[in-house]
Structures are given as structure tokens and as C-alpha cells.
Amino acid sequence: MNNSGKFIVLDPTESPARADQHTATRLDTLEGKVLAVVNNGKRNSDVFLRALLDEIQSRFNLKEVIWVDKTNVSLPMPPETLQRLRSCEAVISGVGD
């Protein structure tokens, strides 16, 4: 909500162009891709992410799904987990509550 009391709706397919920011190349499809799902451990995040994953899997034939459960929402992921995510073509990270 902005200062005038109105909500601002952002379009995730558009972003303001800034010379110091670079975004990842958008995938054309998830078909045949390796997808990682990172559950940050907050309440109900796993419920939401599993429902989202079910929907994605009903639409796309994924090559592999890597599910990561963080044990503490406030701590960063271990380096070995980050290394594992580098092999993925897409990563979904979610929150709960």
C-alpha cells in the first residue's frame, strides 16, 4: 500500500530498467527442466509449495524436482545446498504464514 492508501499492483513480467540490475533469462517452458522448490520452513509454506508443485507437474513434464527444506527460516542455506541449486534451471522459493 502506498502513502495515499491505494494498493500498487506490480506485473512480474515487467521491471524498471536499471543499468546496475540484471535479471535471469526467462524460461520459455518448464518442460523437461530441473526445478528446485525451497521450503523456508515457515508455517504452511510446505502446504502451499506442494500445491503449487502439483499444479506445475500437471502442466509440465519436469525432468527432476529437487525439494529443499530449510531448518531455520532466518539462517542462510548451507553452501552445499546452494551448490546443488546451481544445477537447476528454475527455483521456486516460498514463504508461509
Image (cartoon, grey):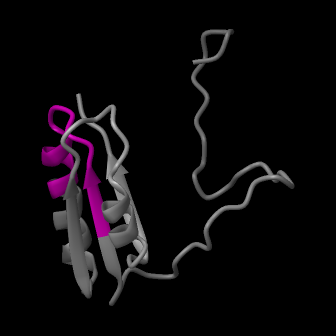
Which residue appears at 57% of the width and 23% of the height?
Answer: 7
Which residue appears at 16% of the width and 32% of the height?
Answer: 43
* Residue 13 x %, y %: 61, 58
| Relative to 82, residue 2 above or below | above
Pick the quarter of the image with the C terminus: top left
Left or right, residue 86 beside residue 69: right
Which residue appears at 36% of the width and 58% of the height?
Answer: 92
Identify which residue, 23 or 53, lies in the foreground: 23
* Residue 49 x %, y %: 22, 52
Q: Residue furthest top?
A: 4
**Residue 87 painted magenta:** no
Determine which quarter of the picture holds residue 34.
Answer: bottom left
Identify which residue, 4 or 31, lies in the foreground: 31
Q: Residue furthest front?
A: 79
Identify which residue, 36 or 14, lies in the foreground: 36
* Residue span colored magenta: 36-50
| Relative to 5, residue 42 above or below | below
Left or right, residue 69 beside residue 78: left
* Residue 77 x %, y %: 34, 50
Determine which quarter of the picture holds residue 4.
Answer: top right
